[in-house]
Amino acid sequence: MTKQQANWSPYDFNGGTCVAVAGADYCVIAADTRMSTGYNILTRDYSKICKLADKSLLASSGFQADVRALQKNLEARHQIYQHQHNKQMSCPAMAQLLSNTLYYKRFFPYYAFNVLGGLDNEGKGCVFTYDAVGSYEKVGYSSQGSGSKLIMPFLDNQLKSPSPLLLPAQDAVTPLSELEAIDLVKTAFASATERDIYTGDKLEIVVLNREGIRREYMELRKD
Amino acid sequence: MSIFEYNGSALVAMVGKNCFAIAADRRLGVQLQTIATDFQRIYKMHDRLFIGLSGLATDAQTLYQRLVFRHKLYQLREERDMKPETFANLVSAILYEKRFGPYFCQPVIAGLSDEDKPFICTMDSIGAKELAKDFVVAGTASESLYGACEAMYKPDLEPEELFETISQALLASVDRDCLSGWGGHVYLVTPTEIKERILKGRMD
């Protein structure tokens, strides 16, 4: 009898790109709505952005089954938090919770690349960017997922951020207005869609500000 | 790790209005260790024809020597310079000669034709040509360069605008790539002159 071997992976990669930009009094979180596997498109209309709390939005690419498991876990933890504290979790607290949740599965990770955007307790925009096992950093803008290598240098160029090593620590929020930030995100995605096969179909933009949450969509290339 | 990433490189060429620009980073490294910060990877074949060679530096230099040799033979026999299209065919043929033991280089060729029409093209290591109307990129920072160029490039730029665009695209891209950077080298070629500029960049 010929030798057999296990040839099954618990992971898949569904592609997708996420971007978040923090401003003085707003936060823009965006992701495309394509979900792929290999050269196939599973759906052109899949939202990668999840509302975790009133002022925390999570955009995730990677393996969407893991992402959904992660979102469910965070939602459950947030429910418990609400019962115990009788209030919504703040964005920085959610950031720490997400990090702990990811690290809890350090040796069988959630295959998820996250950007968490929201407003902090002073109403300032904040963005947290993660790796798959929970290492995270507070930044002014970030991009994760299959098109991140294409988008990140463009964001660097347009939104030069102060070095995190500077003393005293500089504020990372971008100087742009809300509308300028939305336009920038649209340009970045239009460019990434040209060259990344896993990014496309539609762009979902969620804007968080004093007034609340607003959603916009922009069509992207479908090829 | 791929042998194409052994030395690290970033290479880009762009077309403007009756002009072109070709730019590269200046780092020569051995994996993560930086050996030199004044390395040349763009070579001038004649006054309006340039070739940049990304990939393994030793193969790039050897390949360049062969190209100079072949180009000189052509000049002696034909008493004129090679057209960019002809030169691209020559590079492609020389690379394909080594189909099963290739030079680990990805060339970028940029030139002006006799009618001042810009020509840019890139190839893989075995000579499959890719002609582009707008821009071409190569090297370890190629993905970043694609993103930056796609967002910043506009057709029919005047020479000085083109210089600004290619420089911004290069510097933005190499800062997100560990294996390339340490400043940049830009050639801006118009029908009347060649401008060569050294860019200062992050030294980390």
Image (cartoon, coloured by chain):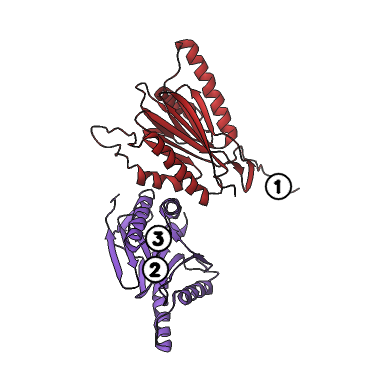
Chain colours: A red, B purple
Q: Earlier in the sequence, mark 3 or mark 2?
A: 3
Q: Residue B101: give its label.
A: none
Residue type at the position of mark 1? Lys
Which of discs 1 and 2 lies nearer the camera? The answer is 2
Q: Which residue is mark 1?
A: A3
Pointer 2: what residue? B18
Looking at the rendered image, the disc whose residue lies closer to the viewer, 3 or 1, is: 3
Note whether B200 is above or below B67 in the view shown: above
Q: Chain of mark 3?
A: B
Q: Residues within 10 Å of mark 2 (few under 14, many from 20)?
A: some
Picture quadrant of residue A137: top left
- Give the image location of residue A25, x and y in percent: 36, 28
Is residue A54 found left or right of A7 in the rendered image? left
Q: Residue furthest left?
A: A168
Do badges 3 and 2 share one subunit? Answer: yes
Position of residue B26 in the picture relative to residue B138 (left or right): left
Subunit ID for the residue under disc 2:
B
How far separated are the C-alphas under marks 3 and 1?
48 Å
Circle 3 — which element?
strand
Disc 1 packing (10 Å; few <14; some 14–19; many ≥20): few
Q: Estimate the x, y position of residue B18 in percent, counting from the top left.
A: 39, 68
**Looking at the picture, which amino acid does disc 2 mark?**
Asn
Of A194 and B72, the residue lying toward us: A194
Which of A174/B5 is in front? A174
Residue A99 position, x and y percent, is: 44, 28
Res B180 visible = no
Q: Picture coordinates of residue A197 (x, y %)?
A: 56, 49
Give me the chain letter of mark 1: A
Q: Are marks 3 and 2 in contact (CB under 8 Å)?
A: no
Q: Are marks 3 and 1 on the same chain?
A: no
Q: Secondary structure at mark 1?
A: loop
Residue B11 is tagged as 3
